[in-house]
Image (cartoon, coloured by chain):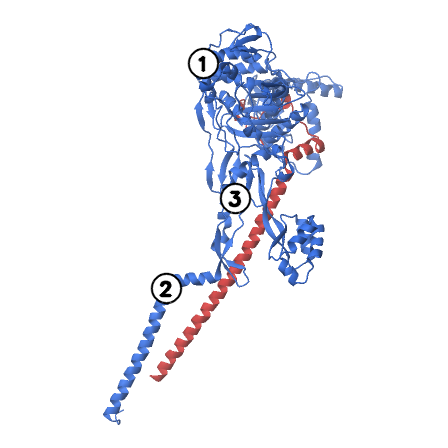
Chain colours: A red, B blue
Amino acid sequence: MKARFLALWTAAVLAAAASFIVHLTLRFENVRLGYEVGAARSAQRELIESRRLLALESATLRQPDRVETVARNTLHMRVADAPRIISASARGRRTSGSAQ
Amino acid sequence: MKNLPRGRVRWMRVRIGLLALLLLSGAGAVSYRAYDLQVTRAPSLRQMAEEQYMRDVKLAPKRGTIYDRHGAELAVSVDVDSVWANPRQLVKNGHDPHRVAAALASLLGVDQGVIARRLASNRYFVWIKRRVSAKESKAVASLDIHGISTSKEARRFYPNTQLAAHVLGFANVDGKGIEGLELSFDDQLRGSVDPVPAIRDRRGVVVYSRQLLDDRASRGDDLTLTLDKTIQYIAERELEVAARTFEARAGAVVVMDPSSGELLAIANFPTFNPNRPGESHFSARRNRAVTDRFEPGSTIKPFTVAGALAQGAINPRDQIDCQQGEMEVAEYTIHDSHKWDTLTPAEILVHSSNIGTAKIGLAMGRPSLYRTLRRFGFGQKTGLGLPGETGGLLRHHKRWYDMDAATISFGQGMSATALQLTTAMGALANGGRLMRPILVKRVVDARGALTDEALPQIRRWVVPQRVARLVSDMLIGVTGEDGTAPEAALDGYLVAGKTGTAQKADYRHGGYAEDKWTSSFVGFAPADDPRLVVAVVLDEPVIAHYGGTVAAPVFRRVVRASLRHLGVAPDSGNGSLDEHLAAHRKRLRALEAAVAGTSVDTAKPAGDEAAVGPDQRRVPDLAGKTARAALVSLHGEGLRVDLQGTGLVVSQKPGADEVVDVGSVVRVVLSPPTPDASSVPDYDAEASQLDTTRPGAPIAVARPSARGQDG
């Protein structure tokens, strides 16, 4: 009777201690994951920001006046006059797509 | 217990019972307390706990991006460093504020005295310089002064500098819209600034926040405009050239798609750089196309004529007496630039007769003329949503003076904006349907969800379709040899339009100033299938002042380049292409033969001739050719083309030398060339083969009504 009581008591104490340790572990893990998520999010933000910067640089390089200058001066391109334009599509203006 | 006296046993039992009762009471109290804490008061206690470890974090939302219709960035926000100081910490760490100020001033280009004053304060936070460059930020960090730090702030960039500056406007250093779309769409662009809860540790570092994981909710919406970056650039370039050539004080160009009402360009002169708005005069920042009204002059005449035709006040074949250039109305005399006897309505537009138009206006009557102009949108805002838009001035007909019905019919005594003129002319180009102008096509939130979309909307039917077409045909004559704007004519396209040359009101002395003019041209092209409506207005040009001389060439250049950009081929480029190519091929063979010293032998082997019927052709070998060369070869044989891909021809179907019927489709697949010098096509040689400047080369076929070459 006494031994059984002692065993039960010990088991209860161990269970309480174990649950306490599990709780603590989960708590620490939660905080650690929080930091990890924060770091990942920070990295994500930096990448998004880098992408924005690259988009900005790309947009700056594609300024129409710059493109025109490069086309005319560096590549020696010129605007095609009407007779040199060959339409690949069937006749009819509405069918012509817009070009960028 | 058995050996104990009965009285003592009873007492022990009482004591055990009391102890059990005590323990039970204690356990009950603990249970009650536990229930109270865990269940009854749980919500309030949880809130108290959260208040201890949760902190509100204020997000710094980024302004949304503004794109043109093809997705090119027009306004972008990116994070840059801002330098700040903690003066208390500086002093605590033993730094001399004056020395620090001197060091920072040399690095950041800020006045040393200003920095020194800020560092001398007793505060925990002062800005030193906001939105510094990456180089400046690195230099400040290299100083390694405790108490001087940098933090990220969003800065607005306009990568195309001056392009569409007046439409975009600009945002201030705090990210608040000040002008243009940045102002009128500030709420959508700026995003939410509401604080969100986040778990922070004892050092203040954010550990976790569900909202922070997805901060897109706080970011501003993205706008997609109807503007076309290329057409906007063309309009701005040509406007500036004209304004400088004719020494105009200011100017505006508006380009619109008449079928949808979408604005493709709104250009203004003078302009400014929205990245540095402070460096420009405030008058240069005005969006004149929507804020400045001017007397439209003769550009109003088509609307008067259209209204009169719709009402039945005149007939297209009517001969209207133009009284040899002079007509008395009330106590005033109306003049024409030329003395005309009688003119038809079409001729009135072609020669821009004031007297003829005045007679049409008088025949309509005041209420009808007023209603017509109102229906075309004059005297009311277009509802575009840009700040400062004016609706122009068109007084109610009950408040008109005796001569107003005559003068307003040809554009004096009223005012309009360039945008109003464009939308009104768009109604004529669009078969009488007045469209609501659209500038912002789509609003999309940070998650990509569509929050708003502008669809083409007909405001009203202004005039019947047959009348609109009739007036459009009349306006084609304006750009003909006898018209007032041959300079607006384009090779290969039919152009309809109307010039305007209006004296400016002299507010100081009354009446009209002798030497101040507003020159304008509004028209559309191609007139038989309008793709663009363009209004050009130049304010106070000095060198010349006629709309046909000053504004019409701008119209021509803008329309020509824009149609090319839109892929609208000129008639001359399509209509006689086959003949051009046949002649070209013959000439090329003759040239090749001449170079080789042999006679031209176009005969083919008898066997081949026998195999190809009169309505059949042998498919040429296209391998390794450019798309252009392939097109030329196939069109020359009377075959149609289905081009796929870019680069050089890698395959074709039907294959080379196969016999097919004339008009058959040949599928041509192209692929980018490999970086092998031998495979690079000789573009120069190809260009020289198609050199149209040589004698006998194909030339553009101009329409009979078109005249005028590039300036």
What residue is pinned by disc 2? Answer: B41
For the question of whether residue A28 can be seen, the reply is yes
Q: Give the CA separation, mark 3 to mark 1.
A: 51 Å
Q: Give the CA separation, mark 1 to mark 2.
A: 82 Å
Observer-nearest residue: B48 or B332?
A: B332
User: Which residue sits at x=41%, y=76%?
Assistant: A13
Q: Quadrant of the N terminus of chain A?
A: bottom left
The crowd level at tag 1 (other Cα within 10 Å; few <14, some 14-19, many 20+) is some
Which kind of residue does numbered mark 2 sit on?
Arg
Observer-nearest residue: B304 or B95?
A: B95
User: Which residue sits at x=45%, y=68%?
Assistant: A23
**Location of residue B116 in the rendering, given as x and y in whole percent from the top left corner:** 68, 53
Q: Give the CA separation, mark 3 to mark 2.
A: 41 Å
Q: Residue furthest left?
A: B6
Which kind of residue does numbered mark 3 sit on?
Arg
Q: Nearer the viewer, mark 3 or mark 1?
A: 1
**Vertical arrangement, residue B460 with respect to residue B96, above or below:** above
**Location of residue B415 in the rendering, given as x and y in whole percent from the top left corner:** 53, 23
What residue is pinned by disc 1? Answer: B365
Q: Quadrant of the C terminus of chain A?
A: top right
